[in-house]
Amino acid sequence: MPTDSLDPALTTKERLVESALQLFYERGFHATGIDMILTKAKASKPTLYKYFDSKDELILAVLRRRDESVRQWFISGMEERATAPAERILALFDVLAEWFEAPDFQGCMFINATAEYAQHDHPVHQASAEHKRAFGQYMLTLAKGVGVANPEELTAQVLLVMEGAIATAHVTGPELVAQHARKTVEMILSQSTLSS
């Protein structure tokens, strides 16, 4: 996954979003104060509130930015590794393995956000759920290309294994997690295609 280092060519608003993204991912949303973000972004409080009415609004901007970069990175990585839909589904776990080994891996920002904003109707929780739905739509397209009888079920199973792998790698460490998850999905694909 790309590291979100601060590019000197960023606008002030982009610098605030990128600084907040790095700090939220590293430290969490509640533990990261506005002053920390301002220091990292080299911006003043009036400048921050010129662009964002509240910390929650800044968090939503960060989640939108993260959603764009993460989905693009995952999909590009899968499509570079494979052409056939079933192979692209398996390539997801090769991309995950690469992410898990990154020195700044802190789990999934969207899972972390829903843990801190647990109410389902909170905008931060909803934005995180929308990221998962959007990626799920891409996976459903692949599952339909596999030609199984129930692509929705296959998609749900693959996403469940993926989310479990992310949580496990974050909690216990990355060693072989993605590889084990890939083998599980190989079995699921094999069973799904046999029963079609």
Image (cartoon, rainbow, N blue to C red):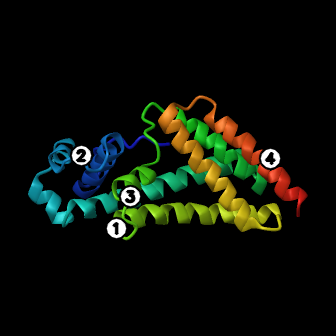
What numbered label is drawn on residue 63? 3
The C terminus: image quadrant: bottom right
Towards the viewer: 78 or 180: 180
What numbered label is drawn on residue 32? 2
Residue 67 occupies which quadrant of the picture? bottom left
Judged left or right of residue 23, residue 138 is right
Q: Which residue is mark 1?
A: 122
Judged left or right of residue 146, residue 121 is left
Q: Residue at 74% x, 40% y: name it.
A: 183
What numbered label is drawn on residue 187? 4
Towards the viewer: 74 or 128: 128
The earlier-in-sequence mark between 4 and 1 is 1
The earlier-in-sequence mark between 3 and 4 is 3
Q: Secondary structure at mark 1?
A: loop
Q: Position of residue 165 (x, y in %)?
A: 59, 43
Judged left or right of residue 53, residue 175 is right
Q: Position of residue 181 (x, y in %)?
A: 67, 41
Q: Pointers 3 and 2 in contact (CB under 8 A)?
A: no
Q: Pointers 3 and 1 in contact (CB under 8 A)?
A: no
Q: Nearer the viewer, mark 3 or mark 1?
A: 1
